[in-house]
Image (cartoon, rainbow, N blue to C red):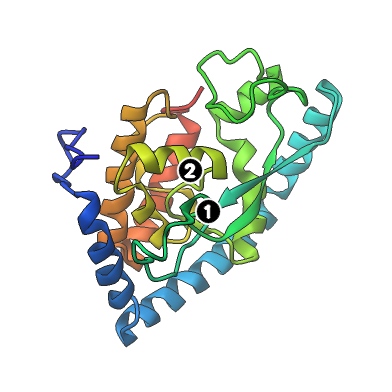
Amino acid sequence: MSGVRRSHPSLPAIELEPSLLRQHYRDWSQAGTNDASRSSEWARRGINLLFALIAIIVTLPVMMLVAVLVWLTSRGPVLYTQVRIGLDRRFPATDTQNHRREHDLGGQPFTIYKFRTMRVDAEQGSGAVWAQQRDPRVTAVGGLLRQYRLDELPQLLNVLKGEMNIVGPRPERPTIFAELREHIAEYPLRQRARPGITGLAQINHHYDRSLDDVRTKVHYDLEYIRRQSLAEHLRIMLKTVPVGLLRRGAW
């Protein structure tokens, strides 16, 4: 695949040929080993744990209400679990080592938690597919939860377990991840950061409707990774609140 062109005018151009990806992996991996980077990572981890604990306490009444509504209005479990691809701290393999790529998930798999917003048989016969606007698989309560991003609240447990941060690239399912990295050369680079509940892409762009939407979000994710800091982390968290309350970019 040739280098991917910029797909959003407000973002810096990213022209990455597949042959250059390994060098970017190496540069970013080495940059994360210095003392300043490690200190910043520990500080962000502490902030994530503290924020997750406070958020669970504050939103517990909301989560209990949501759980009751899901249970009363549709058949099936209240929580929905799904395998997602997480952080990738590995050094990139050489071409000779990568001949079994079909077995390389691209990062550490983990189980994500969400409030269920679809029917229990939503993917019967279709497998893993993107959600759509006015998706008929979404329940009435599920549509409301998605608009206000309330279905994501159980992921605070993933933050406590160290599988996610509050801020970071959104984790994807293994089958969709495998497909996207074949179409977007720099897609695996986003796994160099711990996945998050929200992120720079989420406060600036709507849900994915096409491959171009994913490309735009990847540019935001890589921009976040390049400049990530405690201040940037807090800025994105604060901006997430009006995004959820005003239902921007959700359906």
Looking at the image, residue 138 lies above or below residue 55: above
Give the residue at x 38% y 59%.
233
Q: How many marks?
A: 2
Q: Quadrant of residue 51?
A: bottom right
Q: Earlier in the sequence, mark 1 or mark 2?
A: 1
Q: Nearer the viewer, residue 40 or 175?
A: 175
Residue 223 position within the rendered picture, expressed as x and y whole percent measured from the top left: 26, 52
Q: Which residue is mark 2?
A: 177
Give the residue at x 67% y 42%.
114
230 to the left or right of 113: left
Mark 1 packing: few (<14 Cα in 10 Å), some, or many (20+)?
some
58 to the left or right of 76: left
Residue 209 position within the rendered picture, expressed as x and y whole percent measured from the top left: 42, 23
Secondary structure of the residue carrying numbered label 1: loop
Looking at the image, residue 50 lies above or below residue 184: below
Secondary structure of the residue carrying numbered label 2: helix
Mark 2 packing: few (<14 Cα in 10 Å), some, or many (20+)?
some
Q: Quadrant of residue 136?
A: top right
Q: Is residue 166 visible?
A: yes
Type of amino acid under label 2: Phe
Residue 190 position within the rendered picture, expressed as x and y whole percent measured from the top left: 37, 53
Type of amino acid under label 1: Leu
224 to the left or right of 126: left
Q: Which image quadrant: the N terminus?
A: top left
Q: CA distance from mark 1 to mark 2?
A: 8 Å
- Dots 1 and 2: beta carbons under 8 Å? yes
Give the residue at x 27% y 44%.
219
The label on residue 105 is 1
The label on residue 171 is none
Looking at the image, residue 179 lies above or below residue 36: above
Give the residue at x 81% y 21%.
73
Q: Nearer the viewer, residue 187 or 67?
A: 187
